[in-house]
Amino acid sequence: MTLLHIDAPTGLAGNMVLAALLDLGVPESAIEAPLAALGLAGRYRLELEERRSVGLRGLHLEVHSLEQEPHHRPWGQLRDLLESAPLDPPLAQRVREVFLLLAEAEARVHGQPADAVHFHEVGALDSLVDVVGVCAAMLHLGVSEVSCGVPPAGHGDVRTSHGLLPLPAPAVLEIARRRGLALADSSRFPAAELTTPTGLALMACWSDRFGVAPAGVPEAVGVGLGSRCLDRPNLLRALLLRPLTQGPQPGEPAAANEREETLLLQEAQIDDATAEDLAFLAEALRHGGALEVFTTAITMKKGRQGTLVSALAPPALAADLRRIWWRHGTTLGVREQRLSRWCLPRQIESHATPLGPVRSKWAQGPDGDWRAKAEHGDLAHLAHRHGLSLQEVRRQIQPFMHPPSAPPTGFSVPGPLEGELP
């Protein structure tokens, strides 16, 4: 489990968030590919350079438009572009969510329908690059939880295509009102716009909560710098945190049986395969070493019904399992992330019973109690052989199910049992 905290002591802007994520280690290719899928390749240039702000380093990002006549894209047109572009569905959904919030906020403050909102109010091309780039970078990191500090919005006024507007920007106040977000005191800052509508909309859609950073061990820090000179470092920090695990209380013995392991999660959303094809893919993934394969019914773009196929496996099998996805699946992309799992050790025992041998999986909890589950395949085999119900087989074998004489030594899920289908 990995946490991402966005520390915004001098406010939020889309280019600052994106710069911090790039400084965190997200490759530029992770954001260039979806922008190219939207047909924007060659229409912009990213100027990314390391700078200093009041003595502190960070990356500064500026988006330069290469369009001869910059487009003022209305939300309705932009929405159609996002729906028709070959973007990964989770990315397309996140980008639509951010722009919809922006469009509804701008529509409210200008008194017009959302579809008619032109995104020159929040910057046409640069906001598109910021929103798509931040969403793609967030998905690339695969973090399990996002939090954000309470940002100052700024005070004074700002010049826009509508003339001189008061700060905080009207759209910023509307986004904060809609989402119930707090804004920090800006009175000790010089008069300036500190939080932009794009920056706040991004965090409103991505953050699970606003406030101080959660407890955790910092594993990486990315710094994005703003363009404006303030009386303090104008920066935004992206912190990757490893959460603290609660240890035993004073005088309480540690749970020796409880172990942590890292698993790989691979997922793909599929809407062009039959149920038989999906079952074959799942079985192939299991045979290839996946510990668990499961499916979830989902609704994809344009209302199409689809299936989310998820596979949990040891990280070392990532490349082998990807080859199975490509060979037996129809998806053109597989998402990967690493998860932390706490588990109890387990082992397989074989028991002699009057009905025949039965295997069971045993685990010992931190309190020392044993628990077991007989293998369904063995129970079914004995039920067919003796003409009994599964319930009667369980009743007859129960007296012969003894716990292992030694504690389990394995700490990962065992593979298929002998005689089972892989």
Image: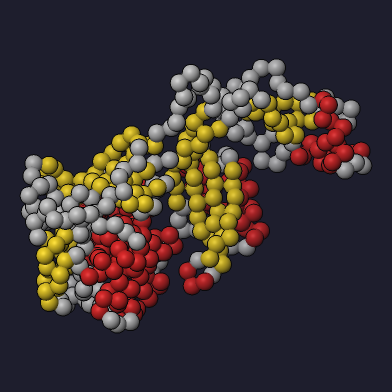
Left or right of 204: which side holds 13?
A: left
Give how far across and how far down residue 51 sits, in percent: 11, 47
Image height check: is 286 above or below 86? above
Name which residue lies at 89% across and 27% down: 354
Q: Is any atom of residue 229 visible in this view?
A: yes
Name which residue lies at 52% across and 34% down: 342
- The number of numbered discs placed on residues in the rendered structure image is 0
Left or right of 415: which side holds 191?
A: left
Name which residue lies at 72% across and 38% down: 420
Left or right of 411: which side holds 80?
A: left
Q: Quadrant of the N terminus?
A: top left
Identify the image quadrant of residue 131: bottom left
Left or right of 347: which side holds 390?
A: right
Identify the image quadrant of residue 256: top right
Give how far across and how far down residue 282 sits, in percent: 61, 50
Give how far across and how far down residue 230 sits, in percent: 8, 52
**As rendered, which of 386 and 282 lies closer to the eye?**
386
Image coloring type: secondary structure
Q: Quadrant of the C terminus?
A: top right
Image height check: is 314 above or below 295? above
**As rendered, which of 379 and 219 lies closer to the eye?**
219
Give how far across and how far down residue 48 sits, in percent: 16, 53
Name which residue lies at 26% across and 76% down: 109
Q: Is any atom of residue 42 visible in this view?
A: no
**As rendered, which of 266 and 401 lies closer to the eye?**
401
